[in-house]
Image: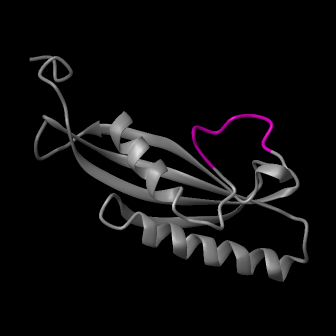
Amino acid sequence: MWELLNKIKTALETIDDLNTVNIGAERGIGAKDTPAARIVTEYSEPSKQNKYFDQGVIQIILLLDLKNDLPSVYEESISLELQIREALKGIVLFNRIEYDQDAVSLMKASILRFTFSGIRNTVEECNL
C-alpha cells in the first residue's frame, strides 16, 4: 500500500499547477499551500476473487483557495481535476468526484475517488 501511495504522489507532483502534494490530510493547510492535493486511503479490503490481493478506494482531496470569484475557482478546479485524472491513468481507476465539500473553511474542496486492486499481500498478512 505504501508503494502505491508514493507512486500516486510522484505522479501528482508532475502537475505544475499543484502547489503542494502530500500523503495524508494534515491540519493547518492554508492559502500558501493551495492548490493542494492530499492523498488519503478511504478503505482497503481483501479481493473477493483472490484473498492474496487487496482492493479499495483512494481519495485525492483537491483544495483551492477562495481568493478569486467563484467562476474562476471552478475553472481552476475543473482543470486540475482533469490533470489529476490524466496523471493517474494506469495507476488507479477513476471512480467519481464529489464537489463542494464543506470540510475545510475558506477553501473549495473536491474529493476525487479512485479504485485500486492487485496489491500483493504477504502470507503473514493473509493469516495463512
Please provide percent x and percent y for residue 73. 79, 74
Determine the residue positioned at 35% across, 58% down: 92
Please provide percent x and percent y for residue 60. 54, 54
Q: Is residue 120 above or below residue 100?
A: above
Determine the residue positioned at 68% across, 72% down: 77
Question: Which stretch is magenta?
Answer: 21-29
Q: How is the image coloured?
A: one colour
Decide whether residue 22 is among the magenta residues: yes
Q: Quadrant of the N terminus?
A: top left
Decide whether residue 8 is among the magenta residues: no
Determine the residue positioned at 31% across, 52% down: 116
In the drawing, does residue 103 fall left or right of residue 10?
right
In the drawing, does residue 49 fall left or right of residue 57?
left
Report which quarter residue 125 is drawn in: top left
Q: Quadrant of the C terminus?
A: top left
Please provide percent x and percent y for residue 100. 73, 64
Please provide percent x and percent y for residue 42. 47, 43
Q: What count of labels does the image hold? A: 0
- Tell me, yes or no, if residue 36 can be seen here: yes
Determine the residue positioned at 13% across, 35% down: 51
Q: Is residue 47 above or below residue 67?
A: above
- Tell me, yes or no, if residue 1 can be seen here: no
Q: Main secondary structure of the magenta part?
A: loop
Report which quarter residue 78 is drawn in: bottom right
In the drawing, does residue 120 fall left or right of residue 90?
left
In the drawing, does residue 7 fall left or right of residue 117?
right
